[in-house]
């Protein structure tokens, strides 16, 4: 128990979520922001801390970091038919880790794609209950990927996650038949409840 009366485990989870959301937001702002020396040093420290945390998590879980290789190497090859399947399409490794950690708490089966091309290929090969799609990805962005998924006749719900202003892409979202949009940094409960609403899946 901490001095504030809040269990230490709850404080730890809150601090972790806050740190990850900070990294997510910082990465989204880099292209349009001029940073001074002190800010650059802070960003380097944040990223180094994130890399160390990722290494610790990999050691504890016995898994390896997802590499940006061929699509088939990064996708779940055998999906259990009785499980709820989620595709996470996100090029940033830290963001993918954050999303998959949240989703695995629901005991859902997760596949990952590191760009829009992999996301489209994954949907052609496997059936998913829902897709989480980042907007800014190299090669084929999330909106273009969603359009190709719809053109292929795939109708499962797509939730777009973006750090950009939603109004800037409102027309694109409608044309791509996007079912919901979450803006970074998003709330964990908001994400889970949105998935439950779109799929009628029981969530906890």
Image (cartoon, rainbow, N blue to C red):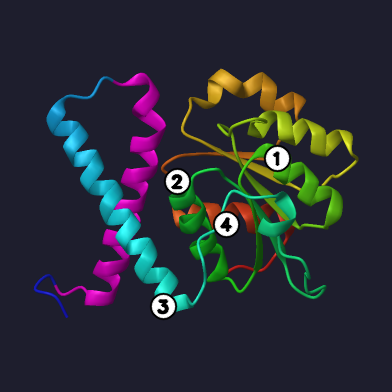
- Mark 4–mark 2 Cα distance, whole angstroms, equals 12 Å
Please give the label number shown on residue 193.
4
Viewer-side label of 3, 1: 3
**Helix, strand or loop for disc 3:** helix
Q: Nearer the viewer, mark 3 or mark 2?
A: 3
Q: Tell me which label, 1 or 4, sits earlier in the chain.
A: 1
Give the residue at mark 3: 60
Residue at 84% across, 45% down = 155
Magenta stretch: residue 162 in it? no
Using the image as rendered, state which of residue 62 and residue 130 is in the foreground.
Answer: 62
The spot of residue 64 in percent (x, y) is: 51, 67
| Image quadrant containing the C terminus | bottom right
Please say whether residue 30 is one of the residues in the magenta stretch: yes
Q: Gap in Å between the C-alphas at discs 1 and 4? A: 14 Å
Asked if residue 189 can be seen in this view, the reply is no
Say if 152 sits above or below 58 in the image: above
Residue under label 1: 179
Determine whether the residue tagged by mark 4 lies in a helix, strand or loop.
helix
Instruction: Work out how far the residue at label 3 is from the one at label 1, CA to CA, in angstroms.
Output: 35 Å
Kindly identify which numbered label has been placed on residue 186.
2
Q: State the extent of the magenta-drawn residues as a range.
A: 5-33
Label whose residue precedes the other's in the sequence (1 or 2) = 1
Q: Residue at x 18, y 40 (%)?
A: 42
Quick one: 79 or 44, which is closer to the camera?
44
Mark toward the start of the polypeptide (4 vs 2): 2
């Amino acid at each position: 128990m901490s001095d504030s009366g809040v269990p230490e485990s709850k404080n730890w989870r809150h601090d972790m979520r806050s740190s990850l959301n900070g990294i997510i937001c910082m990465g989204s702002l880099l292209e349009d922001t001029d940073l001074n020396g002190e800010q650059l040093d802070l960003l380097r420290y944040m990223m180094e801390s994130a890399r160390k945390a990722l290494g610790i998590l990999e050691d504890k879980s016995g898994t390896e970091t997802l590499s940006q290789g061929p699509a088939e190497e990064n996708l779940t090859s055998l999906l259990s038919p009785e499980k709820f399947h989620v595709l996470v399409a996100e090029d940033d490794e830290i963001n993918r880790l954050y999303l998959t950690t949240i989703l695995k708490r629901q005991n859902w089966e997760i596949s990952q794609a590191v760009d829009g091309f992999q996301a489209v290929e994954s949907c052609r090969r496997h059936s998913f209950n829902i897709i989480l799609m980042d907007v800014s990805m190299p090669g084929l962005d999330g909106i273009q990927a969603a359009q190709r998924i719809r053109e292929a006749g795939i109708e499962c719900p797509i939730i777009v996650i973006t750090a950009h202003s939603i109004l800037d892409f409102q027309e694109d979202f409608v044309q791509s038949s996007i079912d919901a949009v979450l803006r970074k940094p998003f709330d964990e409960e908001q994400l889970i409840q949105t998935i439950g609403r779109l799929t009628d899946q029981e969530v906890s």
